[in-house]
Image (cartoon, rainbow, N blue to C red):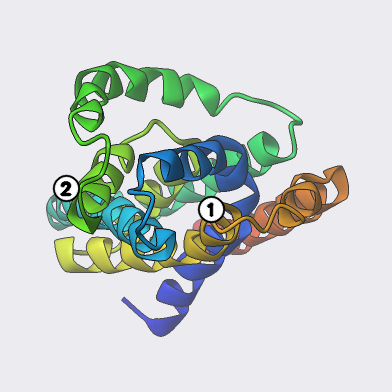
Amino acid sequence: MTEIGLLSAFLMGLAGGVHCIGMCGGIASAFTFAIPKQASPSFYIVAYNVGRILSYSVAGAFTGYLGAIASSSMTTTLPILTLVSASFLILLALYISNWWKGLSYFERIGGHLWRKIQPLSKKLLPFKHPGYALAYGMVWGWLPCGLVYTALTWSLASGSALNGALFMLLFGLGTFPALIATSLGASFLVPLLQHKLTRNIIAISLILFAFVLILPIIQGIT
């Protein structure tokens, strides 16, 4: 995977921070009550997010592996996967901007798996040490999320399990700043990132990027 691809993964996570705060910010803030009173919350917050990103990387390795198998059997698979990735990017843009919530359909599908996994997190509360927060984050990394699903479609087209894992690792690191800031009490970021103008700017940027991905495929067909 090229440096540009990894940079795109990071920027996708960074742009999706507006969605992360809305969906996961409350979780990241609430779990601070499970931290021992005498302990520094920073270690637990970082451990939680590392666990979350580890789960993303595992999922990315799996989807990257599946995509590699499909690409090796069909020469037209990669352009198809690129079109799927671009389509999900547009769906994400519509979702973040609140123009259309069609991506929530995929979140409902993921909810079936989540209902089986989520009870595991209750066994980790309260945290006895940062390792518990790490495991807690690994569980919550499987929370149904349209942003994560969009990133996973990109890892499908990454070419290998390793590339898929790297893509999701960089994506997860991109989501890191917004969630860390929220967890540490930077509440001023929430209205800024949730503002309609911010959402619309991010959405338009994602749509433009999707068309940049699609254009070479269209030119190849014509």
Where's residue 2, x and y in %? Answer: 36, 81
Residue 201, image quadrant: bottom right
The kind of residue on which mark 2 rests is Leu
Residue identifier under label 2? 66
Where's residue 181, x and y in %? Answer: 59, 61
Tag of residue 88: none
Residue situated in front as seen by the camera: 28 or 160: 28
Q: Quadrant of the N terminus?
A: bottom left
Residue 14, image quadrant: bottom right
At 47% from the left edge and 45% from the top edge, which residue is drawn? 28
At 41% from the left edge and 74% from the top edge, which residue is drawn? 6
Residue identifier under label 1? 183
Where's residue 127, x and y in %? Answer: 25, 44
Disc 2 versus disc 1: distance between alpha carbons?
A: 35 Å
Q: Quadrant of the C terminus?
A: bottom right
At 55% from the left edge and 43% from the top edge, which residue is drawn? 25
Whether residue 89 is visible: yes
Residue situated in front as seen by the camera: 9 or 215: 9
Left or right placement of residue 80 versus residue 121 in this view: right
